[in-house]
Amino acid sequence: MTDRAFLGEFEQMMLAAVLRLGDQAYGAAILTEIAVQTGRRVSSGALYVTLDRLEDKGLIETRRADPTPERGGRPKRFVRVTPEGLEALRDVREALLKLWRGIEDRLETAKPRS
């Protein structure tokens, strides 16, 4: 994995949530998916800053839907993972799997710190 493709923990969660949601990936749905799958509550501000960063890196693409009255005239911002984003996510997954191999048993037998 190159520095260019480095993904932080939250970026990984975002990309994974977008992949899980498919064509229904937009801000509120991504926040809900992360909360449901990880138990982590995320602010919408953190979400949109991260979406912008991932888009700047070329790892996602976004498009705006037509505004709707139900949303006060605001459009949904739909998100999809780019091929570069998929590659970056695969790279970080492989790196983490390599690090985890052989230590699962140590986690089970290690004594907790007091």
Image: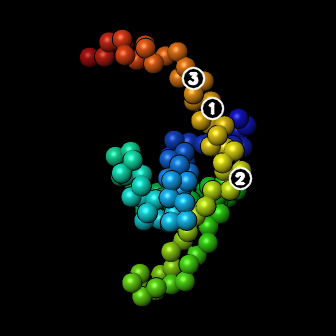
- The quarter holding residue 55 reads bottom right
Q: Secondary structure at mark 1?
A: helix
Q: Earlier in the sequence, mark 1 or mark 2?
A: 2
Q: CA distance from mark 1 to mark 3?
A: 9 Å
**Residue with the mark numbered 2:** 83
Taking the spot 63% from the left edge, 32% from the top edge, the residue there is 94
Neighbours of disc 1 within 10 Å: few (<14), some (14-19), many (20+): few
Is residue 40 something one can see in this rendering?
no
**From what the image shows, is residue 23 above or below residue 82?**
below
* Crowd band around label 3 with a 10 angstrom C-alpha radius: few (<14), some (14–19), many (20+): few
Q: Looking at the rendered structure, which numbered label has been put on residue 8? A: none
Say what amino acid the circle numbered 1 marks. Answer: Glu
Q: Which is nearer the N-term, disc 3 or disc 2?
A: 2
Residue corresponding to mark 3: 99
Q: Residue 77 location in percent, x, y? A: 54, 71
Judged by depth in the image, the label closer to the viewer, 3 or 2, is: 2
Tell me where residue 1 appears, x and y as whole percent: 71, 35
Q: Could you classify mark 2 by the number of other residues whose Cα lies within 10 Å: few (under 14), some (14-19), or many (20 or more)?
A: few
Rendered location of residue 69, percent (x, y): 42, 88
Which of marks 3 and 1 precedes in the sequence?
1
Q: CA distance from mark 1 to mark 2?
A: 16 Å
The color scheme shown is rainbow
Q: Nearer the viewer, residue 63 or 43?
A: 63
Q: Is residue 37 above or below residue 32?
A: above
Figure check: 81 above or below 2: below
The amino acid type, in three-letter code, at marker 3 is: Leu
Check disc 3 and report its element: helix, strand or loop: helix
Callout 3 touching callout 2 (CB < 8 Å): no
Asked whether disc 1 touches disc 2, contact meaning CB atoms under 8 Å apart, the reply is no
Look at mark 1 in the image and give the residue it sits on: 94
Q: Amino acid at mark 2?
A: Pro
